Amino acid sequence: MMVSKPFNVLLKGPLLPQRLQDNLDAHFATSRLWQQDDQAAWLAQHGASIDALVTSGNALMGANAALLAQLPNLKVICSNGVGYDAIDIAAAEARGIVVTNTPGVLNSCVADTGMALLLDVARRISASDRYVRAGEWLAKGRYPLTTKVGGKVCGIVGLGGIGKELAKRAQAFDMDVHFYNPRSRPDVPYTRHDSLLSLAKQADFLVLTLPGGASTHHLVNAEVLRALGPKGFLINIARGSVVDEQALIAALEAGEIAGAGLDVFEQEPSVPAALLTRDDVVITPHLASSTVETMAAMADLVFENLLAFSQGEAVLTRVV
C-alpha cells in the first residue's frame, strides 16, 4: 500500500491562536519553530521538508528573506492577519510561493476600535477616567471642556474594507466623511481628495486605515501633521510604519495637532516614552482586531486557505 507524503506545516510563533494550532495539528504534520532550542540548526536539518509556513504580518512574526531561504521547498505562506508588511512578498513571488492573508473578517472590529479611539481622544474618556481615579474631581472640580464629534470632518486615508466600515460609523455620529484613496471610488457618496495634504487640511480627525509597507512608510510626516492643524486629531489603526513617530511627538509637543489615538507603533511592543505621559494621546496595544469572534474567524480563514492549497484547490484570499 502506497503511503502519501505528509504535508508539512511550520508554525512560526506562539502568537498564532490556539484554535488555529489545534486545527492544523488535526489535519497536517506540524512543527513549531519557537519551541526549537536552536532554530537555525533545526531549520538546517528540517527546512527542506517544509511545505507550508503559517505566520502573521505582526513585526514579531512575519517571514523575512533569511527564513524563506532556509525553506527551499516552501510552497505556501498563510498569514493570520490582513497586513503582510512583515512578510517578504517580493522574495515569495520570485519563488512562486503563494501567500494568503485574512481580509474582510476583521473589518468591523478594526473599525470599531478606530471609532473608539476617535471618541476617546476627542472627549478625553481615558484622561478623565484617570482624573476621577486620582481624586482630582474632588480636589479640582469639573474636568476641562472637550471636543464635540458630531458635525466634524472625518478624513479617512485608505478607503478599503476597513475604511468603509469606519465611514459608516462616523456617519452614525453625524460626521461628514472625506477620504483620500489612490484609486477613485465612484461607489461611495463621500468627498474624495486628490492628495493626503488636501484631506489633512480639511479633516478634524485624520483616520489611517491603509496598508503598511515600503510604499506607505512615513506617509504621515511633519508636513501632513502641520496641515492637520492645532484642532485636528490623528487616529492610527493601520500600521505604525505609516506615521513618522518622531514627527508626531514633535507636533504634539509644539501643539501643532490636538491629539492622537494610536493602536499601532513603529517598534512594537515598544512605545516612545514621550507618548506615554500625554493626556492628549490614547494608546492601545495593537488590539483593533482582538475580539473572540474576529480571532476565531481569522483562524478559520487561515486554515481554510491552507486546506484548499493542500488539496490542489484555489486559495480563498490570495495576496500573490
Image (tube, rainbow, N blue to C red):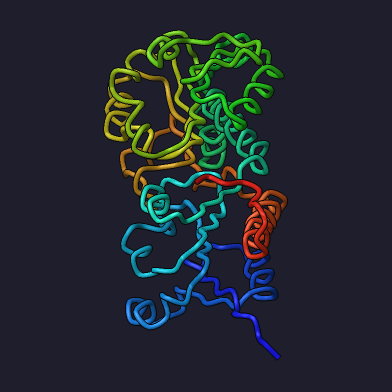
Left or right: residue 246 versus residue 32 is: left
User: Seen from this angle, which residue lies furthest front?
Assistant: 1
* Picture layout, residue 283 above or below residue 293: above
Q: Residue furthest bottom?
A: 1
120 with respect to 189 (left or right):
left
Question: Looking at this view, is 12 or 289 the one in front?
Answer: 12
Q: Identify the residue at horizontal 50%, vertical 60% (top origin).
A: 55
Q: Is residue 159 depicted above or below 93 in this figure? A: above
Residue displayed at 41% across by 48% down: 89
Q: Residue 248's quadrant in the figure? A: top left
User: Which residue: 59% across, 13% down?
Assistant: 177
- Relative horizontal placement of residue 88, taking residue 109 as reference (left or right): left
* Front one among 50 and 143: 50
Q: Number of labelled discs? A: 0
Where residue 114 sits in the image (x, y, percent)? 57, 32
> Would residue 119 appear left or right of 74 to someone viewing this image?
right
Residue 283, percent from left and from top:
47, 40
Give the position of the N terminus as an image quadrant.
bottom right
Residue in the foreground of this view, choosing between 273 and 19 = 19
Residue drawn where x is 56% and y is 63% of the image? 16
Q: Is 263 rendered above or below residue 227?
A: below
x then y, percent, for residue 46 = 42, 80
> Residue 162: x, y in percent?
60, 32
Q: Nearer the viewer, residue 251 or 25?
A: 25
